[in-house]
Image (cartoon, rainbow, N blue to C red):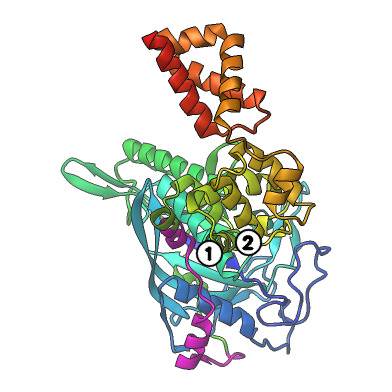
Amino acid sequence: MEIHVHLATATKLFCACPVRYDAPPNSCVCEVCLGHPGSLPMLNRRAFELALLTGLSLNCEIARHTKWDRKSYYYPDMPKNYQISQYDLPLANKGWFEFDVDGAPKRVRVRRAHLEEDAGKNIHDTPGCTLVDLNRAGTPLLEIVTEPDIESAEEAYVFCTELQRLIVHLGVGEANMQKGQMRFEPNVNLAIEAEGREFRTPISEVKNLNSFRSVRQAIEYEGRRQAAEWETDHDYVLDKRPNENRGWDADRGVTDFQRGKEAAHDYRYFPDPDLVPVEVSYAMVEAIGCGMVEAPVARRRRFVAEYGMPMKDADTIVEHRATAELFEQVIAAGAPAELASKQFVNVWLKLANDRGVAVTELGLDAERIAALAKVTDAGTVSRTAANQLAEVMLSRPEPPGKLAEELGLVQVQDAGATAAWVEQAFAANEQAVRDALANPKKMQAAAGFLRGQVMKLSGGKADPKMVGKLIEERLDGMRSG
């Protein structure tokens, strides 16, 4: 897998042009990124630091000496006819990235990560011609290349989603695929066992995939296509048929041949004479390493182990770094972990999504979020009432306990009053009572329905635990009577 990541810098890799995705075509360009004669590039230090941080987070070895190379090619999206890249001395190599597939750990080796400038963008929307927007030319681009350790479309899908999360968590890039800030290029071939031998089909590199769904679908299609090619022609194998670059047509659900796949010698790499090598000191690596954060995969595993959270809830909370950090602050403030995680997913994240913001932008600190979990856990308010209370807390500064009293949401712990509501619910729902007593298929659902009716009669104030206990006692008494 080859992954291209735009780094979150204000300016391009070798010039001062701004990195913008909403600017008019060809408005963010200068002599350097256009390759005008006499112009000289100058390295963006911040881009190098972000690339280094990513390499460290991918468990890579960091090169102490690295240089810049010219990668020659003749396409209109790079008017100087070469791309400044790194060839034989990448800044990071020999790393690995681990993630979970169906609950089992999967480790993919990282062959290298190197820094280069992106090309411009060819636009094919106008019949009869190709338009070129060079605003993207020169944007800092980190290319991550894995070893061939991914064995299925599903593994590739999970790998891509988890890698994108890591990039965003680190803050090294926005990784917005709709804007082209992260692109995936899987190199696909098959190992076919037949006739007591193994046959390897030619490699197809599917270019510039900008969604996780496209990654999965393109790999699945390529597997089917290559298998069919081999069934038709057993000479469709490596060394007998050329490798290919192919494009993904999402509308048709197929890949199309673009050109033969280039090898290193096709690019005629040679050291860039205008840029000095970069010497990376131990002090620099140590300083950059301070910016590392816990990877989303590791944090999700820890949440499940430490807090007893369901994997789905942990995955939802870990989706955004700031949300996960706020959740841990809520736990540190004394909130019970299991209840706090449920309220985060079912209450706070829902309120945030309804408003189009993150939980951290709701205007509540960890202490107030923890306070709601505490009063719920103590039985002061029911979990249903806590949902109402949470919305009020967004506009009121009072503690949740005080708000509950004012709004009449304090949970009733009076066994006599609760028993009276139970009697009313039984009297008004005789069929449900009969089902709860004697219909094995409906017994559980009927009891749940009766609990709901009691909560409705109480206006949500009854203690659900007490309600459940009293209903079971009432049913047991009717069975024995």
Label number found at residue 74: none
Magenta region: 273-302
Measuring from the top left, give residue 135's x and y in whole percent. Answer: 75, 68
Q: Nearer the viewer, residue 118 or 23?
A: 23
**Residue furthest left in the image:** 196
Residue located 40% across and 68% down the image: 110
In this image, 148 relative to 452: left or right?
Answer: left
Quadrant for the C terminus in the image:
top left
Taking the magenta stretch, the answer to whether it contains residue 278 is yes
Q: Which of the 4 image quadrants contains residue 141?
A: bottom right
Residue located 60% across and 49% down the image: 375
Q: Nearer the viewer, residue 302 or 269?
A: 302
Residue 257 appearing in the image? no
Which residue in the structure is indicated by mark 2? Answer: 366
Answer above or below: position of 302 versus 249: below
Answer above or below: position of 301 versus 431: below
Mark 2 is surrounded, within 10 Å at the Cα level, by few (under 14), some (14 to 19) or many (20 or more) other residues, namely some
Task: State which tag comes first along the sequence, 2 or 1.
Answer: 1
In this image, 137 relative to 69: left or right?
Answer: right
Q: Are marks 2 and 1 in contact (CB under 8 Å)?
A: yes
In this image, 364 relative to 267: left or right?
Answer: right
Measuring from the top left, give residue 369's x and y in whole percent. Answer: 63, 55
Local secondary structure at mark 1? helix
Quadrant for the N terminus in the image:
bottom left
Residue located 44% across and 46% down the image: 310
Taking the magenta stretch, the answer to whether it contains residue 184 is no
Mark 1 residue type: Ala
Residue 110 appearing in the image? yes
Which residue in the structure is indicated by mark 1? Answer: 332
Mark 1 is surrounded, within 10 Å at the Cα level, by few (under 14), some (14 to 19) or many (20 or more) other residues, namely some
